[in-house]
Every structure is written in C-alpha cells, then in structure tokens.
Image (cartoon, grey):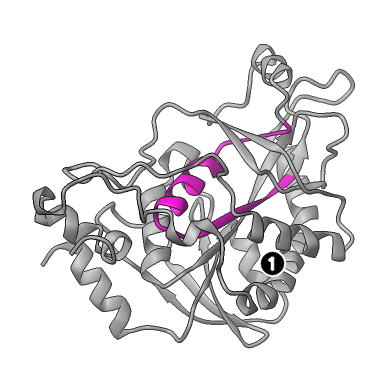
Amino acid sequence: MAAGVALHETAEENEVTDIRIGVIGGSGLYEMEGLEIIEEREIDTPFGKPSDPYVIGEIDGNRVAFLSRHGKGHRLLPTEIPYRANIYGFKVLGIERILSASAVGSMKEEYHPTDIVFPRQFIDRTRHRPDTFFGNGLVAHIGFSDPVCNDVADAMADASEAVGARTHRLGTYLCMEGPQFSTRAESFLYRSWGVDVIGMTNLQEARLAREAEICYATMALVTDYDCWHETEEAVSVEAVIGYLHKNAKTAASIVRNVIPGLLSRERTCACATALQYAILSDPSKVPDKAKTDLAPIVGKYIK
C-alpha cells in the first residue's frame, strides 16, 4: 500500500479528537504552563519523516499539535528540515491553522531584540530546498501574492499586544539559505531592499501550507541586528539563544491566548480554498501514485 493511503487511514483510525490548531517552533513552546501532553505521534509521509514526532496536547480544553521544527535537541540545519513532510503531517492530523514561531534578525533600527514581528510578505533567497508538493504528473499553481493568512496574523498580533510585547503588525521577511549568517555586504543589500527581518525557515512553510489549504502565520522573534548595525555586535549564536530564552515565555503566552479565539472563528479566508482553481492537470492523466500520495491534499478535487 502506498505511503499516502496508509497514512491517511491510520490518521482516521487513531484520531485524537478535533485537532485543528498546529504550532511549529522550538520545543520550548510545548513546555507552556497549563499544557497537558496526551501523546507523541510519529507519522510517515510520501516525503519522508517529519522533523520530530507531533506532540498532541490539550490546553484550556483545546487540542493542539506541536512540532519541533529543527527536531528535539536542534539536530537539523534550516536546509535539512523536511518542510514537505512537516506540513503534510499537519494536514493528515486535520490541522486548519498553523501558528509558527522562529528567531529572526532585525534589519531596521526600530525593531529591537525581544520585539515580535508578524510579517505579511516574504523574499526568497534560498537555493536548495524542495518547496512544493506538486510534480510527478500533477501540476498546480497556487496564488501566493499574500503569503500569510491575515486572519491568523491579526489574531496573533492582538494576543502579542495583550501580553505586553513590543509588537510590529506588518513586515517583510527575507528567507536566506544559511546555515551561515549574512556577510556584511549582504546585510546592507537587504536593508536597501526595505526588508524588516531576516530568517532561514519560514518561507517554505508558508508556501506548503498554502498548497495544503492550511492557514499560516508566523511570529518572528527578534534576537539580533544581523551584522549591519554600527554600534551592536554582529549576530552570534550566543546572542540568539539568550534572546530566544527571554522571548520563550512571551511566545508561549501568545500561543495559549490566541487559540480559543481562532477555534471559535469560521475559516472564511482564501487559504481554505487555495487549490480550487489551481490544479491544471487533467485528472484522467494524473498517475495513480501522485493521486495516492497527495490524497490528503488534493483528494477533494481529484479522485
């Protein structure tokens, strides 16, 4: 039996009741106060194994699925993260909205370490990453002019302001390849483009979530000034980790506070129907394996 079919059936048979919110970030996010962990679930996908088992928990009576982006112990480089498997696994679990959290560098003076930015746009400077579920006889072109779900981003920004975080509700996130940080010349170039923050992970997640018809927004946690700032030291791992620890409790509070409101809202955004007119392939010509592998994603459009 093909991996896609086995995975889809297993998810239905062993379903933990009503998981509609997914959270992706560091493992510290599922150490939040009030979270009861129910189980860890391993999922195999046609794109390999996700970064880690999904941690299924309940907080304030709501079921949530958490995933450690880099794996427990931070084992995966940004380029090594199995982005397709991660988002596919969320889709199989029944996730409708993904809340992302990640460290970023600030490209503007007014975005300080420990500030939180909710980017609405991305610029891609990656080179080596698969970032679509499609191919192998099945072609789709999603609209991606607005890559973040504004409904989710606004809700998260509201929650950020409510907990007292210094919050920036808009911004452009430049996604670089890594794992090295920028050269000074690159940093000045990116600033000339008007970008707000720089990171290494979120663009692929946003693209794949849109293909999977999952709402996606990211909470960008500022840890440094990259290397452009004249009076601040160039970015270092020590500085990033230090500010991440300071932000961890705030990020966890935001996630906890935003979940009830999101679950009470009907999805009326375009994310939920992103594939409706995006698939160009004649269904009769699509190979059976492609249909099977992507059944959780395209099954309502292609049988």
Task: Check the picture and name the quadrant holding the N terminus.
Answer: bottom left
What's the residue at 35%, 43% (across, down)? 132
Tell me, yes or no, if residue 181 can be seen here: yes
Q: In the orientation shown, which residue stands out farthest toward the top?
A: 185
Above or below: residue 177 compared with residue 245:
above
Residue 183 drawn at (x, y percent) = 64, 16
Q: Quadrant of residue 266?
A: bottom right
How packed mark 1 is, by other alpha carbons closer than 10 Å (few <14, some 14-19, many 20 or more), is many
243 sits left or right of 211 in the view: right
What's the residue at 70%, 28% (across, down)? 195
135 sits left or right of 145 in the view: left
What's the residue at 72%, 16% (across, down)? 192
The residue carrying mark 1 is: 255
238 or 248, which lies in front? 248
Write the start and end of the magenta stretch as one range.
Answer: 196-221
Residue 11 drawn at (x, y percent) = 32, 77
